[in-house]
Amino acid sequence: MKVFNFNAGPAMLPASVMERAQKEFCNYNNTGCGIFEHSHRGAAFQAVLDKTNQNIRDVYGVPENYDIVYIQGGASMQFAMIPMNLMQGAADFVDTGTWSSKAMKEAKAFGEVRLAASSKETKYDHIPDFSEWKLSDDASYVHITSNNTIYGTQYRTFPKTKAPLIADMSSDIMSRRVNVADFGMIYAGAQKNLGPSGLALVIIRKDLVERTPANVPTMLRYSTYTENDSLYNTPPTFGIYMIGLVTDWLKEIGGMEAIEKMNEEKAALLYNAIDASNGYFSTPVKKDSRSLMNVVFRLPTEELEAKFIKMATENGMIGLKGHRSVGGVRASIYNAMPREGVEKLVDLMENFRKNN
Ligand SMILES: *Cc1c(COP(=O)(O)O)cnc(C)c1O
């Protein structure tokens, strides 16, 4: 049976990418060995790195005054690296869920963490309206989480801020068009929309890299990565190679415009099924904050939720259990999830509602 993987992360990658990686696994480009058996300083890997950087620059529209680097430790390591390098006194944070809170927690060790806005009081069911944000004049940066993987909320637009805007885009990176120039830095753990886990993609404006205090260790300084093209030490070569394949795929299917349209359509199928169910399925998320990547919903009882998730698994739809902190159902429909998988889930929802 064909399995559709709705896991929140690590998540599925495009089938064609997985097949290409398999084909090249033992013999990359007729070199007689796999890409991750190659020296990171050899021509084969350098070509992979150059291509991957160029793909990201082209597909995502990254301007020349931004560097693209890969850093081990995932998005969580960035929670610490950002304040360590860029915080000069105080920074503003918008708290839209678990990941925002974790970023704030790390920053407290390096300066004053100011809460500019939060949706905590309503259980993180929306993105706070920009008009309510209390931004400070002397903030080093403003930190946001563009898509809240656990609560299923997403920024539809981004605010213009005086201080550089830094976005954790772990769960919606390269899923839609963004104007990179509106941000000081964009970062993302790779395992949702880009490739395997264990590394973060960091897109950082060149001038910010110069802020780092002298006492920050080499491996935790952004400049170590930007000045050495991510090759100061041995980078996660296999992960970078996989991001290369995923961005090749994005290019082939028509780039950000095409993937954005596909993602909007997939999400609409699910939200329409929820809205048309007369309250049988319901989502706590406010309409204008609904995530196109993580669709969270509830059934009338927890028993029915468990039965629904079990039935989905039996029908080849896995990974639908909501995060352990919130319960319910969560369908993660990142770039790689084909429309067919979403249609199958919607069919199951309709049949389940009729019979339960
Ligand atoms: C998954 C996720 C993270 C954590 O990523 P790691 O690579 O496991 O550190 C952080 N932020 C968001 C928004 C996420 O979805």
Image (cartoon, rainbow, N blue to C red):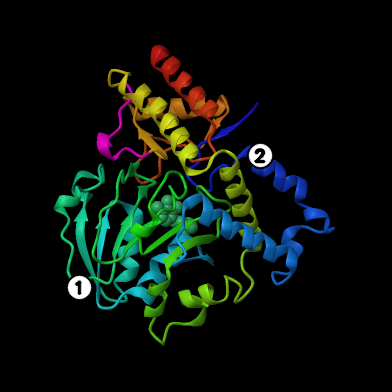
In the picture, the disc for residue 16 is: 2
> Disc 1 on helix, strand or loop?
loop
Q: CA distance from mark 2 to mark 1?
A: 48 Å
Nearer to us in this view, 326 or 8: 8
Residue 281 in magenta stretch: yes
Label total for image: 2
The residue to which callout 1 is attached is 138
Q: Is residue 245 above or below residue 293?
A: below
Residue 88 left/right relative to 236: left
Label 1 is placed on what type of residue?
A: Asp
In the picture, the disc for residue 32 is: none
Question: Within the image, what quadrant is residue 229 found in?
Answer: bottom right
Q: Are marks 2 and 1 in contact (CB under 8 Å)?
A: no
The spot of residue 15 in percent (x, y) is 64, 38
Residue 47 in magenta stretch: no
Q: Is residue 112 visible?
A: yes
| Dominant SS type (magenta) | loop
